Structure formats: C-alpha cells, structure tokens
Amino acid sequence: RDAFRQVGLFRPYLTTGGDADICWRIQQETGWAIAFAESAVVQHRHRSTLAELRSQWQRYGRSNQYLHDLHAVPLNPPLSTAESIRRLTRWLLKEIPQHVLRKSHSSKNHSSNDWITLLSTPLSLWCIHARSAGQRQAQLASKAKEIESWEVR
C-alpha cells in the first residue's frame, strides 16, 4: 500500500505493459525492492494458434516500446534479414538432420515435445518478428502517461 501511495496506481489508459510499468515506477521512485517469490504461483494462458501467438508477441513489442518511451527501457533490436536467413539455414541444414538422426536411432515413440523442439527455431523467429512489428506499430497515447492516484480510491 505504501509503494502504491508513493508511485500511484496503474495507468488506466496504458493498453499493455501496465504490470511492468508499475514495477519500473516502484524501482525508480521508491526504496522498495522487487524480489523473486519462489513459492508464488503464476497462471497464464497458452496460445493455441499461430495467430494468437503472433498477437501476443505483438503486444509484447508494443509493451516494450511503451516502457522505452516511459522509462527509457532498452528496446529489443529487430533481426536483420541476413540473421533471419542464417538462423533458418542453420535450422534446415543442421538442426533438422540432427533431429532426424536422433529419432532414427531411438526406439521411443515421437511425442509432441519432439515437434516443439524441432520447430523451436522457426517459432522463435516468428515471435521475434512479431515483437518487432509490435514495437514499430506502437504509439503511446498522451493519456497513457496519466497515473491514477491513490487518493481517488
């Protein structure tokens, strides 16, 4: 309660990244420390389609840009086309053949985790590009800088 009294509450017009924003304000404007709580339970929803995954990572990108605009948080740089091609080429020429060889020598059934492992490189590139698109699209509204004060409550 004391930390919220010092920094205010959430920014009601910030469309994404409000949790991170309030953490940055607490760290920058108070003597309070944010610590890892090992016994904390975090629940989140897994995305089940590529469209949902892309939308989530675009929100992450917008949030990154907003935090950069509000707190000078460093941005994640976009991947160059050359780096994307290098990673995909490595995946095609090294990771897929290694995966196939391991599976051909294994008598175990293939699980869904095998597919996730095999697809991790293109999925991570998909997410990186979606985050970059979100950063490019982000436009922090002037009202998003408003912070709701404790006294309103």
Image: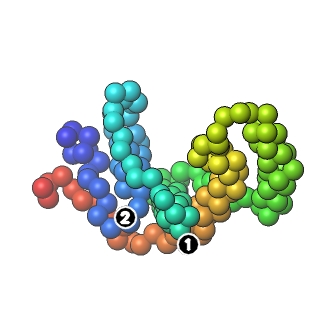
- Amino acid at the residue labelled 2: Leu
> Which mark is on residue 14?
2
91 sits to left or right of 23: right
Q: Quadrant of the C terminus?
A: bottom left
Amino acid bearing label 1: Gln
In the image, residue 113 sits, relative to residue 9, either above or below, namely: above
Q: Mark 2, residues whose alpha carbon is within 10 Å: few (<14), some, or many (≥20)?
A: some
Residue 148 image position (x, y, % from top left)? 24, 59
Does residue 135 appear in the picture of this structure?
no
**Side (left or right) of 109 relative to 95:** left
Q: Residue at (41%, 42%) from the top-left corner?
A: 28
Q: Residue 137 — which label?
A: 1
Sequence-wise, the earlier of marks 1 and 2 is 2
Give the secondary structure at mark 2.
loop
Q: Is residue 26 visible?
A: yes
Figure check: 137 above or below 75: below
